Amino acid sequence: MNAIETTMQVPQGCFTLQRRPRRRHELLRAWDSADEYLLREVAERIQADTDMRVLVVNDSFGALAVALAPLAPQMWSDSFLSQLATRDNLLANGIDPAGVTLLNSLEQPAGPVDLVLIRVPKTLALLEDQLMRLRPLLTADTQVLVASMVKALPRSVWAMLEKLLGSTDTGLAWKKAKLIQVTPDLTLTVPDNPYPVQYRLEGTDWLISNHANVFSRDSLDIGTRFFLQHLPLMQQAHDIIDLGCGNGVVGLQVAAQHPQATVHFVDESFMAVASARENFSRAFGPERAAFHVGDSLEDFSPASADLVLCNPPFHQQQAVGDQIAQRMFRQAREVLRPGGELWVIGNRHLGYHLALKRLFGKVELIASNAKFVILRVGRDGED
């Protein structure tokens, strides 16, 4: 197996870059042609010694922030893993991380800004929220460059940019990437930001708030609905983890069924954990729960949980794969106490039972329908 390329060569220099989370025999680069396209375009517009105020939005693993570090950019992202990778990659290239301002998606960048580089995120609602919050930071002279791989760039992006920022000019495709230049129109009337959105969780009195990057913002998704119908009762549980919690509705339900337990909400999305915190606090008050933005269960101690509930993501940003799920399963095995249980819901075709069997031994099918399966495993194979 050939080693994946880790050296990005762009007009700004040659940089070593790696993804997060780390895995042996990595198959994917930490940057793509859209990053290279942006950096090539930037190199034609500015000099490294300029005092231009730069904002980088949705940098996947820090490729843009590392290459533009001499400009002391702000980097704005909803991904903890992206921020972690950016710090790692800055250090790997001998760059002081303090020179790049890392902002999570709930924070507001400082303005005004002279140059904005935007990678189109997978969730277009996140882009909509970002563009609305970006508007007050722009001047008539601000340069806004938006890039994406062609296969991940829906036509609706152009309409959104023109509605919220100004006219667009699209460059030729280059190495399967597209670049859009936006000319800010400060006379545009922009609608109010609709995020976070809310809905009443069916069968309950709970009002569910969802920030822009939360999956299934407007209603309960069918997978979570199926999981809620089959949640375990473990009355002896003291610590329960909602892993990949999203807006936290699974943790809310399990908290109602286990009033003696502390529920830990865990996600790598800042907006997801903020949504879960708001929803839990409104339903139960701030006690009985802990909220963790982080790299899966990396910060949990061994043998510190009795029950882990998990609906793993099957993509990381635009890349589809099971590496995140596999890592969640391995970490859950370490975090569970003897006699503890991991419950997983997933699409049938993903074959999670094979990975779980390798790690835990016996796998029990709790429920299934045409699309989903719910699987149960015990720590060290215990039932």
Image (cartoon, grey):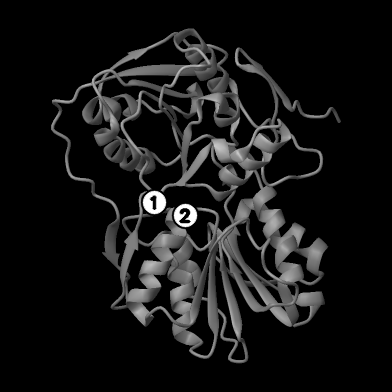
Query: Where is mark 2, residue-wise?
Result: 270
For residue 368, which numbered disc appears in the image? Answer: none
Q: Quadrant of the N terminus?
A: top right
Give the class, few, some or many, for how many residues have Cα within 10 Å of label 1's Cα (few <14, many ≥20): some
Residue at 59% in and 57% down: 294
**Label 2 secondary element:** helix
Q: Is residue 320 visible?
A: no
Q: Observer-nearest residue: 246 or 51?
A: 51
Q: What residue is at 32 percent from the left and 35 percent from the top? A: 111
Quadrant the C terminus occupies = bottom right
Q: Using the image, determine if residue 229 lies above or below residue 271.
A: below
Q: Quadrant of residue 172?
A: top left
Amino acid beneath label 1: Leu
Q: Name the side, left or right, on which 48 lies relative to 349.
A: left
Residue 106 numbered tag: 1
Residue type at mark 2 is Phe
Tag 2–tag 1 contact (CB < 8 Å):
yes
